[in-house]
Image (cartoon, grey):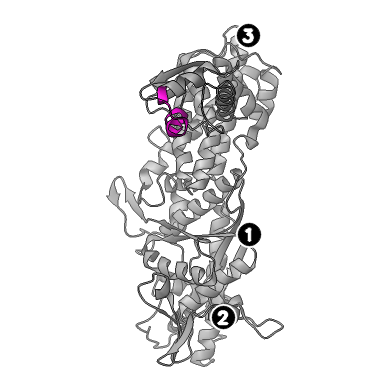
Amino acid sequence: MQIREQLEEIVNQAIAAAIAEGALALDEVPAAALERPRDPENGDWASTVAMRSAKLAHANPRDIAQAIVAHLPENDVVKSAEIAGPGFINFRLTEQALQGVVARVREERGDYGRGEVADGPKNVNLEYISANPTGPMHVGHGRWAALGDSMARVMRHAGYDVYEEFYVNDHGTQMDVFGNSIAVRYMQELGHDAEMPEECYGGAYVTDIARGIIEREGNKYEGLSDDERRLAFREIGMHEMLGNQRTLLEKFGTTFDKWFSERDLYVEDADGETAVSRALAAMDAKGYVYEKDDATWFASSEFGDDKDRVLIKANGELTYFTSDMAYHYNKVQRGFDHLIDLWGADHHGYIKRCEAMMEAWGYTGLLEVVLGQLVNLLRDGEPVRMSKRTGEMVTFEELVDEVGVDATRFLMLSRSSDQAVDFDIEVAKKQDSTNPVYYVQYAHARICSILRKAAGDDSAADELARRVVPEGVDLSVLTHGSELALMRKMDDFGELIALAARDRAPYRLTHYAQELASLFHQFYTNCHIIGEEQAVQDARLALADATRILLALTLDLLGVSAPERM
């Protein structure tokens, strides 16, 4: 049980006792209402329950606070309780309570801070990246990859059941344009006077695909008609791009439970129905589909959208929105009770129509859209716009190849999704304290080095910790200010996970990791470990080991490695 939970129980017992004795005129025990004081000098925790209960109790908040403090039961958690201001109750924790955090981290290890979702949706479909398979992923896709993957990890740790999904946009006009672009480059490489149309994909990668086809299959497609060649190259190009995406994302540590093909929305089932037709029928049954100007419309303006949206054009062509509508309906039919879509900020204008379609079906509030701002790529503080190798945009793959997975992920996650990230390539490559991921990883590696020194060999850290820290180690000697500060930060972890999951904010873990690393470095500077009297050395090794475990767990939830040597 976390210290906060223990303290809540103690406050609740005090309130119940005060009510039972007639010191408080309340019909039931209110919530303990604990929060962190803004100024750490005021204590470890503060309760606002007295002020929140004043009207119900018909009493002065300070008098209520006094009654609660007077009825606090004997416990090993509260060192002191002081009444401040209009009725705050400020609690200071016992050293014993903080020392218990060390034992708990070492016992629970990767399960430390794991929670349960008390109420609200638990079965979540999280869809992110969903890059078109028509070209290489850009740096922004890298941010969505880091953000979505870490969000899923944190939410799972908090107790959610998260299903990760990548929507493959492999249907529609853009695929035909892509296939035609490859076909033109293919014919040009074979010496034909073929002209690239105005609507095309003109990147060098298209020529590379065409050359690859020639290297593998020669002029096999030269004699086909333009339409046959376009269709063939559409499939070849799509599979090559999709394969590149899978390979890069696996390298980046981002995997999906499902890669959902847009084409599947148009496949007929045994009843001759498709996902698209079923979604349209469900919307029509609600009375929000109508015909106008030979087109089929969705009455999205009835749900706050600025205008109605076309589903089927006058020429019979379905709009992109129709596919998106069918896809979201499909998600609901698969049994998810909450949908999270991670989109780039440039899709902001698309949100209202998607919320409208969910509301029309009767699924109000089921869809949540998280917008991610873009990445400003820098090199020594100067904007980077073009790749030195290709002369075109810097791709996600090139960035990972230059700075590595760990630095890319950590820096992509260093700010809230609604803020742009200034990603300096040269900072990401530095191996010093100015690079935040290096700073955190170095703290972990330093602890592993301490354990090796204590044990006198080079075994893995987990094995070393089992040997150098006695079972049932006495932690009561951990009373130095640096030790207490480190333990307080460890105790914050459970609440951090719950809030980061609730707010879809994994960036908070990057800040936490840096703070925990900083407090460890301060502890290591102020408190010698190896060579102290045995009881002190054992306890400090346990504290260092708990820090190592928690640093590794935090980094893992960010998708970043925790090296034992650097």
Numbered range of the magenta stretch: 49-62
The amino acid sitting under disc 2 is Ala
Packing grade of label 3 (10 A; few <14, some 14-19, many >=20) is few
CA gap, disc 3 and disc 1? 50 Å
- Where is residue 417? Give x, y as percent: 41, 51
SS class of the residue under badge 1? loop
CA gap, disc 1 and disc 2? 32 Å
Q: Nearer the viewer, mark 3 or mark 1?
A: 1
Tag 2 or tag 3, which sits nearer the N-term? 2
Disc on res. 285? 2
Packing grade of label 2 (10 A; few <14, some 14-19, many >=20) is few
Q: Are marks 1 and 2 in contact (CB under 8 Å)?
A: no
331 relative position to 48: left or right: right
Q: Which residue is denoted by mark 1 in the rendering? A: 257
On screen, residue 304 above or below 52: below
The amino acid sitting under disc 3 is Gln
Packing grade of label 1 (10 A; few <14, some 14-19, many >=20) is few
- Where is residue 119? Give x, y as percent: 59, 48
Q: Which residue is denoted by mark 3 in the rendering? A: 534
SS class of the residue under badge 2? helix
